[in-house]
């Protein structure tokens, strides 16, 4: 992982915080699939120092699914024939909006 | 016996052939049936009154009897043999039963050798239990092992988990319980089968790694579309993806259409309008007054009345794509151009049979001054006159034609000469009789061309293609499709003395001219491109940095070496098609690239090797 300049090497993990205050500690590498989070963690922004990204638009149950997706994606990088992740229909639309916000519309990065 | 027979004979009714046959051999079918019934009744009575078995032997007799029913039938069928024979058979049967019991007992002993004591009475009990649990044959009555009700055993009666049989309702319950755990492991994971992977490869939608979260969500949404009540808050790109997915599953109907028609939308794409009636289209126009881009596929019911309604509204379409609307008459098209043509920038009309004619195209030049993109596909009516009309529209930058009428080269040459200044896309599909003059005209006039498609020409020659790409001041092309530009000669298909079609010289010139910009190349069926031609074009010093898809099917000279060279010289290549290239046998495919159509049992190769 890249280091951010004079600071200590960045942690392997980042913390994602939902609108209602739940915190998810996730492998940094896995979150980089999202261009939005990748941008937030780049050096001029506060998030790059603290490693804490707040998402005031995303609820905990949706962010939970997003985090699950990050790990699912990370686990299946470059694997052929990946089984689909289960998505509960009741949060589907919210998740769709979160996916759009986080830029998760490309097949792979 | 005889008196009983006489009584039975009075019953009238159809007789089976077997009954007749038995009667002719002095055997009574009735007698057999009555005997069998009597035995069954006896067995039932036995079973009803069954107390916990005291004497193993007794239970065995009654329980084992039904199992030997076939033998009984033979006995019953041969009443003429007399008592002695029956007695002998009975004895034999008893002997057999005894044998069976002995066998079970000895088996039991073998298995229970570990037991310290060899308890005989215990054995007997086990044996009795085993025999009483034995399934009754179909046709008999038994008590259900769960609810205890009496029922008739059939071939479909299920066994209870701990011995005995189940009545139909209880059996159904058990089946329900069984079915759930059986299905579960299948559902888990939802891994796609090999077939589906292959189908995706052929569709060009195959990727390694996980699907994007958005794709997953859209798929879930499409599966549960009846639960969704409003998708208006989503970005238009996402809405478009949902529309595509729904139409793919043929789920777009008057109900789901409501999700897409909002008063504020300016862009609407109906990818499968087959289930929508004329009223639905009118409703679309009613509810979306801001509409600028309208795309309708399979819009069979987009009829004159719908167009009339559209003409009566203040909708100024900029982008109109109509596919399959073959009930819309030509006069309505003309009326549409006259009233609404001013704002039109893009017009695509496909699969309309004969109802979009030259007259409509001629009207275009006066009514649609800002038209930039024109596409007429699969049209049976438009001919040279219509193209002459298009040629007089200097605003056009993208022209795609797929006509069924034959049009002379001169008319296309005229089109290119007049529009060449702005022309970026020229797509002429299935133009069998178009010759080199068109290629020369493109060479001389076009300077901004990015996409060029000329397919199925049987007259153009290699020399013509060579002239086009040699010293052409047009920037590199991005999209080239020359499929099936080749000589058609059935007598001597391999000889091509005149160099008809796209051959080596033209191909090498094409690759040299557009090497830096080419993204998509299709030279399918250009059979006379030689091995040397390919080897030169994809030689060690050649790189095609942008090429993503290459189609070289039915180019006979392609070898393993050429395919390897192609993968080396095209770093971005995603898919290579080599159907019918019989010299391709065993190629190493780099990781993440797709080679389709290798002539082996696999058909396509996705190699995991890193090369």
Image (cartoon, coloured by chain):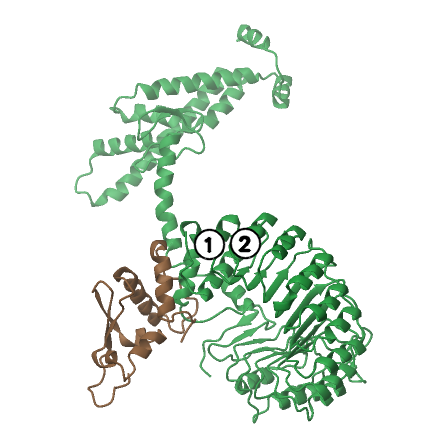
Q: Nearer the viewer, mark 1 or mark 2?
A: 2
Distance between mark 1 and mark 2 Cα atoms: 11 Å
Q: Is residue B580 above or below residue A84?
A: below
Relative depth, front residue between B10 and B5: B10
Q: Is residue B55 in view?
A: yes
**Residue at 68% over, 91% down:** B472
Q: Earlier in the sequence, mark 1 or mark 2?
A: 1
Disc sitting over residue B259 in the figure: 1
Disc sitting over residue B284 in the figure: 2
As drawn, the residue found furthest toward the top would be B3
Relative depth, front residue between B115 and B526: B526
Q: Is residue A87 in view?
A: no
Q: Which chain is green?
A: B
| Hue used for the chain lettered A | brown
Mark 1 touches mark 2? (CB < 8 Å): no
Residue B12 in the image, given as x and y percentages of width and height: 61, 12
**Residue at 61% over, 56% down:** B310
Name the secondary structure under disc 1.
Answer: helix
In the picture, residue A20 is in which quadrant?
Answer: bottom left
Residue B585 in the image, given as x and y percentages of width and height: 59, 77
- Quadrant of the frame with the C terminus of chain A: bottom left
Subunit bearing disc 2: B
């Amino acid at each position: 992982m890249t280091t951010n300049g004079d600071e200590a090497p960045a942690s392997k993990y980042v913390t994602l915080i939902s609108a209602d205050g739940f915190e998810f500690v996730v492998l940094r590498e896995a979150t980089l699939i999202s261009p939005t989070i990748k941008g937030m963690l780049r050096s001029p922004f506060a998030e790059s120092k603290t490693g804490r990204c707040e998402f005031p638009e995303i609820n905990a149950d949706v962010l939970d699914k997003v985090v699950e997706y990050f790990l699912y994606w990370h686990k299946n990088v470059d694997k052929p024939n990946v089984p689909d992740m289960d998505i509960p229909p009741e949060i589907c639309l919210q998740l769709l909006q979160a996916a759009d916000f986080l830029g998760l519309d490309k097949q792979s990065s | 016996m005889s008196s009983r027979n006489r009584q039975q004979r009075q019953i009238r009714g159809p007789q089976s052939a077997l009954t007749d046959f038995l009667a002719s051999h002095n055997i009574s079918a009735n007698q057999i049936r009555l005997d069998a019934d009597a035995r069954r009744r006896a067995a039932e009575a036995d079973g009803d009154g069954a107390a916990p078995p005291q004497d193993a032997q007794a239970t065995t007799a009654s329980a084992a009897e039904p199992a030997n029913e076939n033998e009984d039938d033979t006995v019953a069928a041969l009443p003429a043999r007399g008592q002695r024979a029956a007695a002998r058979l009975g004895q034999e049967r008893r002997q057999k039963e005894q044998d069976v019991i002995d066998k079970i007992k000895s088996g039991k002993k073998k298995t229970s050798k570990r037991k310290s004591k060899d308890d005989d009475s215990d054995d007997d009990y086990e044996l009795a239990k085993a025999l009483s649990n034995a399934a009754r044959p179909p046709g008999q009555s038994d008590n259900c092992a769960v609810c205890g009700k009496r029922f008739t055993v059939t071939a479909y009666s299920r066994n209870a988990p701990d011995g005995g049989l189940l009545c139909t309702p209880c059996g159904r319950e058990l089946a329900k319980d069984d079915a759930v755990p059986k299905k579960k492991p299948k559902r888990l994971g939802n891994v796609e089968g090999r077939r589906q992977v292959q189908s995706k490869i052929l569709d060009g939608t195959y990727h390694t790694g996980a699907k994007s979260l958005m794709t997953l969500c859209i798929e879930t949404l499409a599966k549960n579309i009846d639960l969704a009540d409003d998708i208006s808050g989503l970005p238009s790109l996402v809405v478009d993806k949902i529309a595509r997915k729904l139409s793919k599953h043929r789920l777009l109907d008057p109900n789901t259409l409501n999700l897409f028609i909002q008063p504020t939308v300016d862009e609407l794409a109906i990818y499968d309008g087959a289930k929508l009636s004329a009223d639905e289209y009118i409703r679309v126009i009613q509810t979306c007054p801001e509409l600028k881009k309208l795309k309708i596929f399979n819009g069979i019911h987009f009829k004159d009345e719908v167009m009339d309604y559209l003409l009566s509204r203040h909708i100024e379409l900029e982008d109109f794509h109509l596919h399959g609307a073959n009930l819309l008459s030509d006069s309505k098209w003309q009326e549409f151009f006259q009233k609404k043509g001013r704002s039109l920038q893009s017009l695509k009309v496909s699969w309309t049979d004969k109802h979009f004619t030259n007259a409509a195209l001629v009207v275009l030049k006066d009514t649609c001054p800002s038209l930039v993109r024109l596409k007429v596909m699969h049209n049976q009516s438009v001919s040279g006159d219509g193209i002459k009309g298009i040629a007089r529209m200097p605003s056009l930058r993208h022209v795609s034609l797929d006509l069924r009428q034959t049009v002379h080269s001169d008319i296309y040459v005229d089109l290119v000469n007049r529009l060449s200044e702005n022309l970026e896309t020229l797509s002429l599909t299935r133009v069998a009789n178009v010759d080199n003059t068109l290629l020369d005209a493109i060479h001389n006039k076009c300077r901004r061309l990015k996409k060029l498609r000329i397919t199925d020409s049987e007259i153009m020659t290699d020399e013509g293609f060579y002239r086009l790409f040699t010293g052409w001041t047009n920037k590199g092309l991005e999209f080239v499709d020359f499929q099936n530009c080749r000589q058609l000669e059935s007598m001597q298909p391999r000889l091509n003395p005149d160099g008809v079609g796209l051959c080596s010289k033209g191909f090498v010139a094409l690759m040299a001219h557009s090497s830096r910009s080419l993204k998509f190349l299709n030279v399918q069926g250009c059979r006379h491109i030689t091995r040397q031609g390919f080897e030169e074009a994809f030689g060690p010093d050649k790189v095609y940095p942008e090429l993503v898809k290459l189609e070289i099917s039915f180019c006979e000279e392609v070898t393993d070496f050429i395919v390897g060279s192609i993968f080396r010289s095209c770093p971005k290549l995603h898919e290579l098609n080599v159907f019918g290239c019989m010299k391709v046998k065993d190629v190493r495919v780099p990781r993440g690239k797709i080679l389709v159509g290798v002539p082996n049992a696999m058909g396509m190769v996705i190699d995991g090797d890193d090369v």
